[in-house]
Amino acid sequence: QVQQVESGGGLVQAGGSLRLSCAASGTIFSRNVMGWYRQAPGKQRELVASVTSGGSTNYADSVKGRFTISRDNAANTVYLQMNSLKPEDTGVYYCNTGWYNLAWYDYWGQGTQVTVSS
């Protein structure tokens, strides 16, 4: 079983910054991908950014150039630095850890609210 504890959400004005953290614990396969998803009210959950244990990153077009994902493999922790925030970045942000080892394993955090005021 994998547990994930997220932190760093909050209320910020447009143009501001926030940094999200997610610490995963439990039995985690060494080759994995960690990422952040978000869900705005009335919308589907969408990928914001992801990073593999090898360091490859992927970003949604809407956050490229503003958000940076990073990770500490030794601590099984993933970070999301969010700069130049916009009201449309508002939503619940979920941490996800997944890997493939004969089957796909997928774990989610409880979510942290990010609200960007205009």
Image (spheres, rainbow, N blue to C red):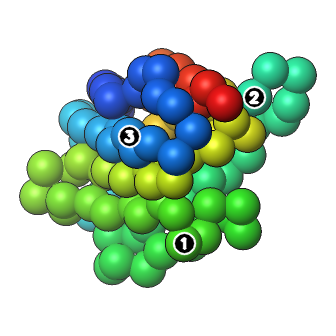
In screen coordinates, is 63 left or right of 75? right
Quarter of the image that includes the N terminus: top left
In screen coordinates, is 58 left or right of 118? left
Depth-wise, is mark 2 or mark 3 nearer the camera? 3
Q: At label 3, which amino acid type do we have?
A: Leu
Q: CA separation, marks 1 and 2?
A: 21 Å
Secondary element at image label 1: loop
Q: Check disc 3 and report the residue beneath it.
A: 18
In screen coordinates, is 34 left or right of 106? left
From the viewer's perspective, is residue 28 above or below residue 52? above
Q: At label 1, which amino acid type do we have?
A: Gly
Q: At label 2, which amino acid type do we have?
A: Ala
Q: Check disc 2 and report the residue beneath it.
A: 40
Mark 1 or mark 2, earlier in chain:
2
For image coordinates 13% across by 50% down, the residue present is 75
Task: Identify which residue, 45 or 11, lies in the foreground.
Answer: 11
- Residue 36 bears which disc, if any? none
Task: Identify which residue, 43 or 52, lies in the foreground.
Answer: 43
Secondary element at image label 2: loop
Q: Check disc 1 and report the residue beneath it.
A: 65
Q: Is residue 108 visible?
A: no
Q: CA separation, marks 2 and 3?
A: 17 Å
For image coordinates 27% across by 60% down, the residue present is 71
For image coordinates 88% across by 22% down, the residue present is 42
Residue 86: x, y in percent?
Answer: 64, 44
Q: Is residue 91 visible?
A: yes
